[in-house]
Amino acid sequence: MAVRRPGRARCGTPDGPSGRGRCLRPARRERPARHRGLLRPQRLLPTPTGTPFTFSYALVLLATSLYAEFGDPATVAALQQASSTDVAHLVRMPPSALAASALWAAGGPLSPFTIAFVPVLTTLERRIGALRTAAVFAVGHVVATLVTEVPVAVSVVAGRLPASSLHRLDYGISFGLLACVGALAGLLNRWARVLVLVCVGSMLLYDLAVFADPVADWGHPLALLTGVSGWLLVRRAAFRRRG
């Protein structure tokens, strides 16, 4: 009488005239295809063919960050001031101001927003594609900028802020990045989504409590909510791309 040992394969009925039994091994449970690729660390790095938008954008940010670090300080200051999305620039040339302000990384290449840029946008682009990722970034950047700068203009006209507030220095990728974070959270599982939103939301609430930069401190939560509001569209895009 055969004795079954723990952890051994179980043999079935004799197979064929030889009388040898066929061992029935339990089938390995495979992960869904859409999750296997995302678990590899190299999937967080952009590539020219896999994530062209993130790859090219990261090169632009790297170039402007290096120039801001090692270029002529006076020239850098003039370029950044010309790229600012303050009220004065938005009134005179809104499209070019909005586009130019997103070419600089505030805080340099080692700022938290710059470090998070590559993994966040790479992951989102692999799920929904380059054009949709660019659209999410652009919408978050534009919406948060306009919603925060319009009250500044109204306050100056009403006499509650000085006229110098129309020429404040305002540039960076944080609004567009936080919109992508909010959109990407809608593609994660429940616990990962809660973890991301709680961690990012806590950081933004802390900035609001400190209130060092009112325009940016209000714009960051608005940009995150802009990405969250597009969950339905982002999930549809990810579903179609998988299909």
Image (spheres, rainbow, N blue to C red):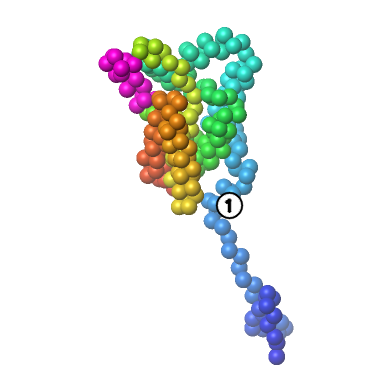
Residue under numbered circle 1: 36
Q: Is residue 17 left or right of residue 68?
A: right
Image-based side of 47 in relation to 135, left or right? right
Q: Give the main secondary structure of the magenta stretch.
A: helix
Asked if the stretch drawn in magenta spans residue 157, the answer is yes
Mark 1 closeness class: few <14, some 14–19, many ≥20 residues within 10 Å: few
Q: Where is residue 60 in the image (x, y as percent from the top left)?
A: 57, 23
Q: Quadrant of residue 154?
A: top left
x, y percentage for residue 99?
45, 21
Relative image position of residue 223 (x, y in whole percent): 41, 33
* Amino acid type, mark 1: Arg
Q: Is residue 164 magenta?
A: no
Q: Which of 13 and 40 is in front in this view?
A: 40
Would you say residue 156 is visible in this rendering?
A: yes
Q: Which residue lies furthest to the top in this view?
A: 74
Vertical relation: 102 (above or below) 42: above
Q: Residue furthest bottom?
A: 1
Residue depicted at 47% across the width and 12% down the height: 82
Where is 107 relative to 51, above or below?
A: above
Image quadrant in which you'd find residue 54 = top right
Q: Foreground: 163 or 81?
A: 163
Range of magenta residues: 145-161
